[in-house]
Image: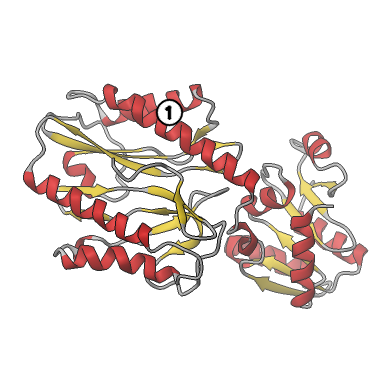
Amino acid sequence: MNLRIQKIYAKLAQQNLNGLIVSSPANISYLTNYTSRDSYLLISRKSNIYFTDSRYIEETKKNLKGLALIKKVNGSVFKIIADACIDLGLKRIGFEERYLPFAEHKKMKEELNKMGDLIPTYGLVEEFRQIKTAEELEKIKKAIQITIKAFKFIKDFISPGKKEIEVAAELDRFIRYCGGRSSAFDIIVASGPNSSFPHHMTSQRKVKNNEHVLVDLGVEYLGYKSDLTRVFFLGKISPTVKKIYGIVRKAQDKAIKNIKPAVHINKIDTAARQYITQEGYGGFFGHNLGHGIGLEVHEEPHISPKVEGILKPGMVFTVEPAIYLPNKFGIRLEDIVLVTKKGCNVLSGSLNK
């Protein structure tokens, strides 16, 4: 019996729902242990049904045998889902409001409101995804190991005259060679002043001597992701860059020292942000301190000053303080942390980078 789906059954009962239409690919993957593409999953105690088109029918029959019935979509997927709900006698159906574009939401309401109540839900599956199992942790650790290996490899490749895009291409090739399925997101290689853009679009700019290169890299391994950022220095380091690097590194250290069960999530962000502010650079750290990571690069928990939840053992997230000085440069350090029963474990290794 699939324990993850059993937990969803219990949640549905609590909310007086007969079923749930899951549309998030990551949530479907979590519940079925199968990589979802262009599909929907209907969960109910009467029957679980997976809706997909002819491209994936045979593959899903093989991988979801005993877990869900497979229905071929030919025409309106919501009409087919509505017919299935009618056949099962489902009257109150939850759906993942967050993942449906307006046009699809409109189509769903047109079809499913004919047979009962359509109830928006938020976070039913994500709540469980926050706590990683031992099997999930092994996949995340493997993704991290490949990422770190790639950083060590690229250190000698980065040199004056190399284009940012060349560095990114070499990283992409290397992580596939090492067993990663692909990069988890568009690789960020930001040299010199480009490092002042938090999500710089890797460009044709050539790396120069006596500047640094910020590399934000993630790997996908068996569906699970990593996300780490390192800074590489070429030639002499200016006193200002060295100072900012030291502040960011210490801010990360302060945040990590606060990570343990039952601590409020916003306290972790505050620990880093207060130190950066104290050093006079609070206005140059604009994003959250971190985000959960797993089947998605950005998932819950979000490490933000606005989030008041508490840390629990099994949560995995990034800690990535930064300072970005417009038109000059930026420094960001990013590591992945696991909350343990007594504290935390920095899965991506030592802070002495």
Q: Nearer the viewer, residue 284 or 194?
A: 284
The image position of residue 74, as x and y in percent, is: 79, 46
The image position of residue 243, as x and y in percent, is: 13, 50
Tell me if 13 is positioned left or right of 284 in this view: right
Residue 93 appears in view? no
**Residue named by callout 1:** 172
What SS does tag 1 mark?
A: helix
Tell me if 190 is positioned left or right of 54 in this view: left
The image position of residue 13, as x and y in percent, is: 80, 74
From what the image shows, is residue 87 above or below residue 217? below
Q: Nearer the viewer, residue 253 or 243?
A: 253
Specify few, some or many for label 1: CA neighbours under 10 Å numbering under 14, 14-19, or 20 or more.
Answer: many
- Please name the residue shown 31% across and 25% down the image: 166
From what the image shows, is residue 327 above or below residue 287? above
The image position of residue 58, as x and y in percent, is: 81, 34
Q: Name the quadrant of the C terminus.
A: top left
Q: Amino acid at mark 1?
A: Asp
